[in-house]
Amino acid sequence: MFFLNLSAFEFFALFTAVSGVAVALYLLDRSKKKLIVPTLRFWKHSEKPPVARHRKRIQQPWSLLLQILGMLLLLLAISQLRLGSPDRASRDHVLLLDTSAWMSARAPRGTLMDEAKAVSRAYVRALPPSDRVMVVRTDELSTPATVFESNRQAIEEAIKQSQAGAASLHVEQALNFAVEMQKLHGRRAGEIVYAGAGRIDASEVPGIEPVPGLRILSVSEVNENVGLRKINMRRSMSDTDLWEIFVSVRNYGRVDRVIPLALHFGGAPIGSARLSLAAGTEQNQRFEFRTKAAGWLEARLLVKDAIPSDDRAVLELPAQKSLQLAVYSDQPDALRPLLSSNPWIQAKYYPLAAYNADNGANIVLLDRFNPPVPPKGNAIYIEPPTAGSPMKALKQATNVPLIGWRADHPMSAGLRTKDLKLDSTQVYGTLAGFSPVAEVDGGSVIVASSAGPKIAVFGFNPGRSALRYELAAPLLFANLFQWMAPEIFRRAELNGDSAGGVNVVLDDGMDASAIRVLGEGDSVLPFTVQGRNLRFFGGTRGIVRVLAGDKEMVYSLSLPDIAEAKWTPPKNIKRGIPKFSMLEASSRDIWQILALLGALCLMLEWFLYGRFKLAFAPRFSGMLARFRRAA
């Protein structure tokens, strides 16, 4: 016999206080006398006030005993008195329901997820009614679906609503989570029950340690499956219209397979291959596809296996963007070689008389011309006249050596020149909002501003100076266009990957402070960088963009993360559904009976000694007397 809600000290303290108050009320009750007088004329105030005398003894001890007994029984019900041993009282169990991607595999009876739900419900129904269960859905993360709950209907509803996800299973993390939940929120630790197939990452197998009270509820063995692991697409560095496609396929089964692989773009076939995969191996296949248009690329394995969701992946290809450059010059031949060397630039040449401030171009180049109305967007000025120039020259210099390039500006990144002399150039001083790019003795010959629309001012014509013979000339214009329109020259890389933890290999020298990871709706996702490895977590299917300098990597997390290895717990671990007799508690809950008896005692006291007797007892006595006379 033991208390579940209160300790013995708390119970006796409450009972002593309640019974003491009841006894004090009986002892302090004043005697009352009822007087009947014919009129107020005969009422005389006493010169001395009546003296109230306390009773020296309790006149109705049985009434007091009934009240104390009733309160005792009610306090026993509140403290939840149980008959039996506290060592076999109700326990708190944690049910780890596997919701990893592997649980979507087809089984003899539905899917593995259906089997896991069935064995989980059977386990819950085998427990004693007083035991509590916390349902935890576990894959790469462990998410509680309930608190420690004794309501079987709520527990089974949480099991019913569980579905297989897209991430892989991390068993060790799930077991540690269950132990912590029992320590923090449990009253008496019961079993930690895992229901699932036990497919985990191969790197996790050596480090898994079983926890006390672990029980395994196994499901069917599914061994044969092949699936897409990753898809990588990037544009060729030498041909902007060419996509290089790499598809990775894995054989998760135990037998060798020949797998047909097909690629479609916009519903039309663009490539196919037959891959010979040994058991437990992975193979990459390379394709090339030429297009400028946007569209949907689909990779499909022409097989029927256990997990259909990893047999197909779809990626959205963006259209090939090009920079629209409007060149206003009466002598454009000097600039054509520099502007035509970049395949991402589409230059259109106009005479000065055809100037239009709103021509729809991304960048406007003005050769020795200051228009009456400045361009609305980014602009490049080459040898602008003094009148109306955005940057007035200090002087005109001839045959001046170029001292150097300012490495702190993006336009001069990686530029090196030696013994370069400019035949004729304008020399500029300093102006708020403008930064020097190339310098000579006495000032700058190239300046740039990013306040508002970006502006670059050249004091000389690169196509008519000695710079045209330098390797720095095309690199200078490539830096210039990339600085003015970075979205055009951002290198795009598309990846079809699995949900969960994603590892990205960065380029050498990448500044971690310039990296952004954006999810759906451009929401910012947390990430970590260690060396060249960037890692972020995408727990659900969706699109994640990684912006790193001039490179954009788009990850379509549409493939399930299928684990390769099988977790084999030690043989001494309990398995299967336990028998009810093994878990039945020897203690018994009797608070309902105690509450009912306590209420009956208080009602009996009220019936025998309370107002009920004063109000209704004479009537019952009269009725009984009339009945006797009639008899």
Image: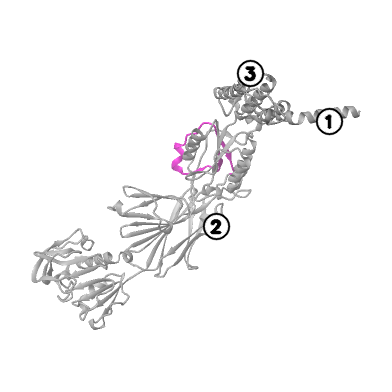
Q: Nearer the viewer, residue 361 or 187?
A: 187
Q: Residues within 10 Å of mark 1 (few under 14, many from 20)?
A: few
Nearer to me, 232 or 319 = 319
Where residue 325 sits: x, y (%)?
29, 74
Q: Which residues are magenta?
A: 194-220
Q: Amino acid at mark 3?
A: Arg
Looking at the rendered image, the quarter that the N terminus falls into is: top right
Q: Looking at this view, name the residue that lies furthest to the bottom.
A: 353
Mark 2 lies on residue: 303
Residue 498 sits inside the magenta stretch? no
**What amino acid type should be assigned to the residue bearing mark 1?**
Met
Residue 476 position by quadrant:
bottom left
Where residue 543 sits, quadrant-wise, is bottom left
Say whether marks 2 and 1 touch (CB < 8 Å).
no
Residue 219 belongs to the span the image colors magenta: yes
Residue highlighted by disc 3: 55
- In the picture of the structure, the residue carrying the numbered disc 1 is 623
